[in-house]
Image (cartoon, rainbow, N blue to C red):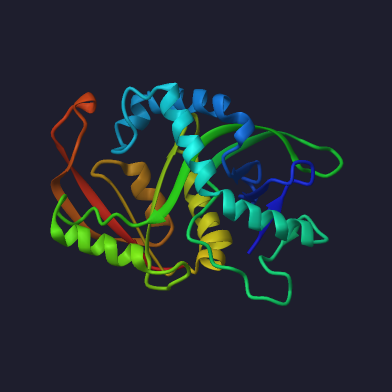
């Protein structure tokens, strides 16, 4: 596993491989809450993005972004403290997740949620100096979208999955993501998903089971998952309720399952 550390800020991050090494995935930053929320607001009010997302409200307001960022900062505080200790114990800017004597601790979350494009690097160290927020990534315990909403089956499946301890190989995880329209069609998200799986989810979450879902017709998400060895489980017709602000009614969804690296 490779977690990079910015020697100037001590921020941990994941970096996409060449030729996309200008893309990094970072935690949310407490000192950039307002700035990031403003960019999120612009992107999540673009029909090329929000029309394919079930979760975020529309219209998406700056305060929605602020609340989301603060929530993620609080959720990942302990993980980032652990990574900070690893960084301080390491002699290099990259660590393998252990101190050489103990097995790495398994985590229950992925703190790397912000996809950023680096626009300036430090000439001496190569560390990112300036970057632009271009997308969001979530890896969390799976919500079982294929089970009927508000059903006892759904509640039981979620409870059984959520009750498993961190690092348990039977946990089913789910992914979600969105990207600025300026980055669509470049294959960037496919590489970002692979990077998070390889560099974080497998070695530090012991991920074995992973699913993703998207609205029927979302060819971008379909390609992202197919390129990462996901296969379709099912298509559910007229299944997911849509917010009245996004047109209302119900939309069909595709559920896919990861088959490994």
Residue 187: give x, y in percent of width and height. 49, 44
Q: Is residue 187 visible?
A: no
Q: Nearer the viewer, residue 235 or 80?
A: 80
Residue 248: quadrant of the picture: top left
* Residue 250, percent from left and from top: 14, 38
In this rendering, position of residue 240 left or right of residue 28: left
Query: Residue 209's spot in the image, x, y percent?
Result: 38, 67
Give how far across and how far down residue 113 sits, in percent: 52, 45
- Quadrant containing the N terminus is bottom right
Q: Farthest residue toward the right? A: 124
Rendered residue at 45%/32% (across/down): 67
The residue at the point 27 percent across, 60 percent down is: 158
Dividing the picture into quadrants, the one containing residue 55 is: top left
Let me know if residue 59 appears in the view.
Answer: yes
**Residue 143 vertical position relative to residue 60 in the rendered view, above or below:** below
Asked where in the image residue 118 lies, by quadrant, the reply is top right
- Residue depicted at x 26% and y 55%: 255
Q: Is residue 217 above or below residue 246?
A: below
27 relative to 51 in the view: left or right: right
Does residue 218 lie above or below 213 as drawn?
above
Q: Residue most toward the bottom? A: 101
Q: Residue at x 50, y 60 (%)?
A: 197
């Amino acid at each position: 596993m490779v977690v990079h550390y910015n020697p100037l800020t001590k921020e941990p991050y994941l970096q996409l491989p060449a030729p996309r090494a200008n893309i990094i995935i970072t935690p949310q930053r407490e000192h950039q809450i307002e700035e990031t929320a403003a960019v999120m607001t612009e992107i999540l009010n673009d029909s090329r993005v929000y029309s394919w997302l079930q979760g975020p409200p529309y219209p998406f307001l700056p305060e929605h972004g602020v609340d989301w960022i603060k929530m993620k900062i609080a959720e990942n505080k302990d993980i980032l403290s652990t990574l900070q200790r690893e960084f301080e114990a390491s002699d290099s800017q990259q660590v393998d997740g252990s101190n050489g004597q103990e097995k790495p601790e398994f985590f229950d979350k992925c703190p790397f949620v912000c996809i950023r494009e680096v626009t300036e690097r430090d000439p001496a160290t190569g560390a990112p100096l300036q970057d632009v927020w271009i997308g969001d990534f979530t890896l969390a315990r799976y919500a079982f979208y294929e089970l009927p909403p508000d059903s006892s089956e759904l509640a039981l499946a979620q409870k059984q999955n959520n009750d498993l301890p961190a690092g348990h190989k039977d946990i089913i995880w789910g992914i979600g993501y969105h990207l600025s329209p300026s980055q669509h069609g470049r294959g960037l998200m496919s590489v970002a998903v692979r990077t998070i799986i390889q560099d974080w989810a497998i070695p530090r979450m012991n991920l074995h089971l992973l699913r993703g879902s998207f609205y029927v017709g979302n060819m971008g998400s379909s390609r992202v998952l197919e390129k990462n060895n996901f296969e379709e489980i099912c298509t559910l017709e007229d299944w997911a309720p849509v917010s009245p602000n996004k047109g209302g009614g119900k939309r069909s969804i595709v559920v896919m399952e990861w088959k490994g690296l």
